[in-house]
Structures are given as structure tokens and as C-alpha cells.
Image: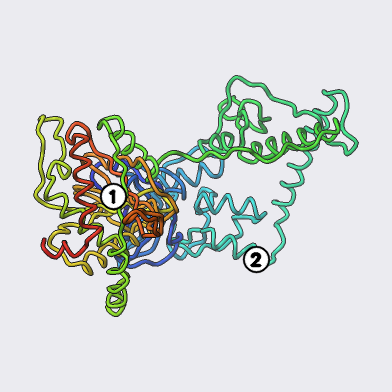
Amino acid sequence: MVREFKLPDVGEGVSEGEIVQWLVEEGDTVEEDQPVAEVETDKAVVEVPAPVDGTVRQIRADEGEMVPVGNVIITFDVEGEPVEETTDLEAADAAEADGADPEPAGDEGTETAGEAAETPEGRVFAAPSARRLARELGVDIAEVDGSGPSGRISEHDVRAAADSGGSEPETATAEASESASAAEASAESAGAASGGSTAGGAPQQVESADREKTLAAPATRRLADEEGVDLNAVPATEKRDGEPFVTPEAVREYAQAQQEAQKADTEALGLREEPAEREERTPYRGIRKSIGDQMERSKYSAPHITHHDSVEVTNLVEIRERLKGRAEERGIQLTYMPLIMKAVTAALKDFPMVNSSLDEENEEIVEKNYYNIGVAAATDAGLMVPVVDDVDHKGLLQIASEMNELVQKARDRSIAREEMQGGTFTVTNVGGIGGEYATPIINYPEAGILALGAIEERPVVEDGEVVARHTLPLSLSVDHRLVDGADAARFTNRVKEYLKDPELLLLE
């Protein structure tokens, strides 16, 4: 029995995902809940588990492909159940890879597990990717023994056949020779049309068929798009229903001839080859787009104001230094961040509007009596904000342990969506990269975000003398619809009190 597995809904509001990496190949045996693929959504990268014990029958999405939720991405032959005949989609895939019109699979197009890999219709039972690889390696797919279900040929089987050192069958050699002759003739024709050729005999331009209509399989049309080739310009070697029919091989030959002609033109004119691309373009999607959309919404929804200040934190530095060794004995790394999170939480209790949000739909201000502090973390995928819940009810080491774990999960891109939700206020550390002041964007719909500069020794004035003291730059951005400038300054002053004299936190 074939079990189809559809891309699941891995999070609320997620409509599609990108196949980052397949962890299995066709023909592999898998166990239930074994990860078979990594999928990136606009929230995180998640592992997709196998739903059954069985064997991978067909992989239906390529790495890098965006797949809508609900689309079939992989099929399995379930362990202990009879293997089904070739499905309609698999037969269509095979026909498409052969350049033939897809035909529905029926009783005449099936095979048992003990039969050869070739179907009664003369087509080979192989994955499209295996067929492409066979053409690239010069392997006759009909001569390859399939190790997959029902003798299906996988890429692994093709590579094994290529590594065996066997020579190409005569038919394949003849076809290659014939194709080479056709390409050579096309090149000579193009050279004549342009009035000559380069010293090396390469054509200066490529002859175009210049048709208005061309028949081709969908895979061939995709290949033409990838190669930047006009399908109507590719010479057709056969016809279907009286219309020119172009094969993938013809597209590749035409694309190669174009490239050689362009190179020949460059050499003939004594020009140097164009330098490498000065720009690289990558799709704006996934986590990067999710971050951008959130920033855009915040910036254009909430009118920001930013208040800058600094605080002398010599006592904070000394306390952290004393506690750091005790924390390490318990296997916990203690940074300044947990101490600052406690100070911020204490200040939020005194200024509840900074811990609020605006329900725009209902036109209500929501004051929150819980304190979930987000910690912005820089990752390879962009800025993520893990949230430590109920900071006011947790001790320093518990906060440090939870924060360290969540930040690491964010950087590993294994963090769950719910672990980045429900924050009431955010703290971000720009000082870790060497900065001092910033204008941070609020993590909407929160009302405030505090950016921390680098804790360094700086000159300060004490009793009329300039001395070196550890200071911490602070940058507070707030939603001006909820928090006035004066309250932003007062909130910052209260945070400064707790950071300058951390022992005050013992009274909270």
C-alpha cells in the first residue's frame, strides 16, 4: 500500500514551506517519526517526520522548492503491506522524463517486485532525478538494476552503475554520435550564416528555428527557463500531432551551442570575458521575509520615539563577577542579561503602560500583569526574539538557564514558534557587536524595547574629578500612542536605579 504524505501545517498562519534538505533517498527504509526532511517556513526550520514504518517510494519535491501546505511531498510503501502498482502520478513523471506524453498507469503498465525495472510499455521505472543523472553521466538507464520498490531505479543505482566502469551501450554511443553530428552541423550552418567563423572554427551565432508554436513536456519547458533558452528557437528533431516537438537533449545542445558562439564572438573581437556577476539575488522569503514584514508593520503602525541615556554599573559588574563562578559550578553561564531582565521587570511594575499593548481592532489599551521578556538574538537567518515567560517569578539562575537554551535553539533554527510568542517587552544587546546607542524597532504589538550598549570603562565625573568607571549606554524605544516621552524618561531612570544598585532587586 502506498502512503502519501502531505506537507503538514507546521504553524498557525503558515501556508507554504521550502524544502531545505531531504534526509532520505528513494528506496531508503524508514521508521515512524524518523525525520525525512527539513522544511523552512516563515517562522523556523522544522524537521518533518515519517508517518509510518516503510520504504521511501518517491520524493515529489526538490530541495529549494516552495511547497504549499497540503501538497504531497513524499510517498512510502508501508511495511508489511503489499506494494501497490505504479501510481498515475509516477507514470506521468516517468513519461515526462522520457519526453513522452504521460499515459495513465493500468494493469498493463505494472510490474511485480521480482520483475525487471522496465515496464511492458518499454519505459523504464525510474525517478525523474535518476533519469537526469543517467543522461549527465552517460549511463543507459535501461541497463541499470533498480534497488527501490518494484525495481524502481534511484540516483544511487545510477551512480553505482557509473562507478562500475562499464562502457556505454552501442545504442547510447550511436545516439551521442548522432547528436554531436547534429550539433556540429548546426554550428557550421550558423557560422556560414554569419559570414565566417573564428580561428578555432566555433560559430559566431546560433541558428534559431523561430517557430510560433512548440510542443514539449513540462520538464523540458522548465529546463528551457533555467537555461535561458527560447523554446521556439530550439531545433526540433521530431513531431507530435503534426507540430514540432522539442526534447530536453535538444534544449541542452542548443544552450551549449549558444554559449560556445558567444565565447567565440568574444575571442574573435579580442575582448576579455565579462567579469563575474557583481550582484547575487536570492528569494526574499522564509524567516528573513517574516522578520522584514514584522519590522515594517511595527514601524508603520506604532509611532516610535527613542530615549537615550547611560548608567554607571560598577556594582553590577562586581556582582556578576562574584556570582559567575557559582553559576558555572551548576553548569550555567551567567551573563549580564539576566540581571538586566530582572531590573527591567521591576521597573515595568512601576510603569505598567510600558508593559502594555494597544488592541486596535477593539480600540482598547491592554495593561498586562505578567512579565514575559523577549531577548533579541542575532542568527544566520536574521533577528529572532525568544521569550522567557514570567521573569518576575523566577530566580536569576533559572532565567539564565532558560534564556541560554532558547537563544541557542534560535541560532540552531530549532526553536518552536510558540517559544517566540507572548512577549510583553523586549531587550536587545547591540553592545555585543561593539555598539553604544541605537534606535531599536519595537517588537510589535509590544509598547517598548530597550537596547543595551557595550559595558566598558568610560570617563565619568565624581566629586569634580574625571575617573574611569564601567558604564552602560541605554536606548529605549516606545510606542508614542501609549507612552509619553516623560514616562519613557522616568522608566529609564528607574531601570538605571536598579542597575546602579542591583541589591535593590532583593526588595522586589
Residue 47 in sight in this render: no
Depicted 462 relative to depicted 323: above or below: above
Q: Nearer the viewer, mark 1 or mark 2?
A: 1
Counting from the top left corner in percent of width and height, residue 191 is at: 83, 29
- Badge 1 marks a residue whose secondary structure is loop
CA gap, disc 1 and disc 2: 38 Å
Going by the numbered disc 1, the residue's amino acid type is Pro
Residue in the image at 33% along x and 51% along y: 452
Residue, disc 1: 8
Q: 327 or 54: which is nearer to us?
A: 327
- Badge 2 marks a residue whose secondary structure is helix
Q: 217 or 318: which is nearer to us?
A: 318
Residue in the image at 33% along x and 65% along y: 34
Residue in the image at 45% along x and 49% along y: 109
Residue, disc 2: 163
Given the current orientation, which residue lies at the most extreme front position?
A: 464
Q: 265 or 343: which is nearer to us?
A: 343
Give the quarter of the figure containing the C terminus. bottom left
